[in-house]
Amino acid sequence: AQACKAMPQQCFAAASVHEQQAKDLFAWFEGTALLDNVTKLVLDNVTGTSTKLGKNHCCNGSSAGTSQRCIALKTPTWSYNQGMLLGAMADMHALTNDSHYLSIGACVLQAVMT
């Protein structure tokens, strides 16, 4: 805190870097299929798809062409996963002022309560 008072430009630059890192991490999350499109609940894990080389490629935060690289495993959902996402969506909204994150959180919260 003291350093930010002494050099506010550096703190602003650091905050911009952290905001971008948070956005990048959320983009990664969206690319993993961990948020079930049907139930709107956070799944516990995903698996990868095989390539020609026989290696699994998953959770790299992107889609391969038109098909997703990560495939959701329909395992039980756990309340701590939902809570982590709800907290993250509140933090992302506070960081970016983008209501999109609150909308995602609201969908997850509704799914938890039903």
Image (cartoon, helix red, strand yellow):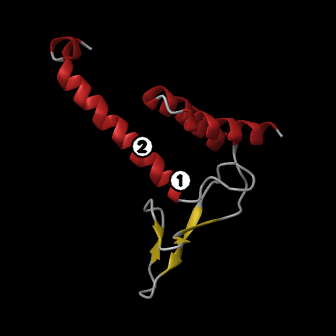
Image-quadrant location for residue 90? top right
User: Residue 31: x, y in percent?
Assistant: 51, 58
**103 or 91: nearer the viewer:** 103
Q: Residue furthest left?
A: 6
What is the crowding at mark 1: few (fewer than 14 residues within 10 Å), some, or many (at least 20)? Answer: some
Q: CA distance from mark 2 to mark 1?
A: 11 Å
User: Residue 4: x, y in percent?
Assistant: 22, 16
What is the crowding at mark 2: few (fewer than 14 residues within 10 Å), some, or many (at least 20)? Answer: some
- Amino acid type, mark 2: Lys
**Residue holding disc 2:** 23
Q: Earlier in the sequence, mark 2 or mark 1?
A: 2
Query: Is residue 92 toward the left or the right of residue 71 in the image?
Result: left
User: Residue 7: x, y in percent?
Assistant: 16, 17
* Residue at 51% in and 70% down: 69
**110 or 78: nearer the viewer:** 110
- Amino acid type, mark 1: Glu
